[in-house]
Amino acid sequence: MIDPAPNDRVLIVDDTLESLQFLTDTLESAGLDVHVAISGEAALDVLGKIKPSVILMDAVMPGIDGFETTRRIKQQPDIADIPVIFMTGLTAPEHAVDALEAGGVDYVRKPIVVEELLARVKVHLANAKQSRSSLSALDAVGRHVFAVDPTAALLWSTPEADKLLQAYDPCWSPTDGCAPLGLQKFIQEDPDEGASKKIDRDDFALEALVVSRKAPGEIIFRLKDVREGADAERLALHFGLTRREAEVLQWVSYGKPNRVISENLGASPRTINKHLEHIFEKLGVETRAAAAACAVRALSE
């Protein structure tokens, strides 16, 4: 038994009905949600509707074979992270190499040994979950990042980075396979680590910062929403503040006294004091300096 999570599903791609039935029975008995496709074309169609946790791919099929199907999967950023395990009766070493070069993470020989298959599926389900958790963790701490190659082809991105890029360019989608046009020129300039670029579109502005170029062929960017009022929105979300409390905290982080804050926000000093009382309570601090430090840390993440 694999002890699957409720959303663990496997897509089996095989043109032999007997193999499909055997694999379906085996994986369903292990507690997995199983979907099937009898060709590479059918698999790509299924992947347009669902995102499985792992794919079992027959190598040799009529039409689009398993190698080409996998290459097409890996060209689509929204599904490229799904691990593909090849199933093949081919025994020559070059066929295993072909499977890995196409984007497969593993392969099993036919005839399938049930225990081996279940063990490999279990390992790759765990690895995929860990990878998704890592991307989600980056989002959770404000690390909205994405990676491209030097031609601006999209390699991977966190969900929140996708949202920021789509807010900047509503016509863009991760399925485009490349960064939005506004970023492509900057990427093709081959920027060094630490280089940044502000890009504007209508009433939306982003800053893209190069945070890593350590992996060959991979440039990792961190995104930040730099619209007017974006920092106040971030503070409100981070600390559970009202919009006005977040604006007050933002000015406090700039080191401004109540008199200046009241003038900028069009509120009386007494009202500013009341907001500060609520801010201190929500942040669990007792002084302006401590509140300012909390705000600076949150905005620098």
Image: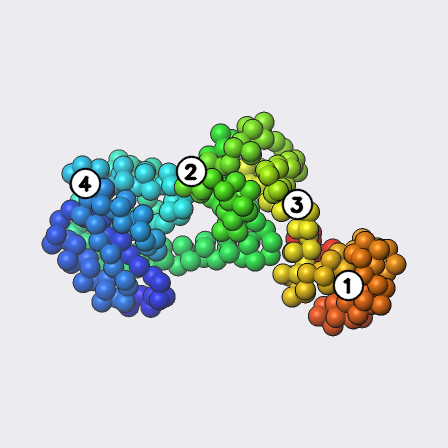
For marks 3 and 1, give the one nearer the viewer. Answer: 3
Dot label at residue 176: 2
- Residue 294 sits in quarter: bottom right
Q: What residue is drawn where x is 46% and y is 36%?
A: 178
Q: Spatial distance from mark 1 to mark 4, Cα to Cα? A: 63 Å
Q: What element carries label 1?
A: helix
The amino acid on which the numbered mark 4 sits, given as a three-letter code, is: Val
Above or below, 162 relative to 26: above
Q: Bin the neighbour count of mark 2 within 10 Å (Cα to Cα): few under 14, some 14-19, many 20 and up.
A: some
Dot label at residue 172: none
For marks 2 and 4, give the one nearer the viewer. Answer: 2
Q: Is mark 2 on a helix, strand or loop?
A: helix
The amino acid on which the numbered mark 2 sits, given as a three-letter code, is: Asp
Dot label at residue 60: 4
For residue 149, say whether it is visible.
no
For marks 4 and 3, give the one nearer the viewer. Answer: 3
Task: Find disc 3 in the rendering and name its residue.
Answer: 226
Residue extending farthest to the top is 189
Judge left or right: residue 87 versus residue 270: left
Report x, y in % for residue 97: 30, 38
For residue 272, say whether it is visible.
yes
Q: Spatial distance from mark 3 to mark 2, Cα to Cα? A: 24 Å
- Residue 98 sits in quarter: top left
Q: What element carries label 4?
A: loop
The amino acid on which the numbered mark 1 sits, given as a three-letter code, is: Ala
Among numbered discs 1 and 2, the one appearing first in the sequence: 2
Among numbered discs 3 and 2, the one appearing first in the sequence: 2
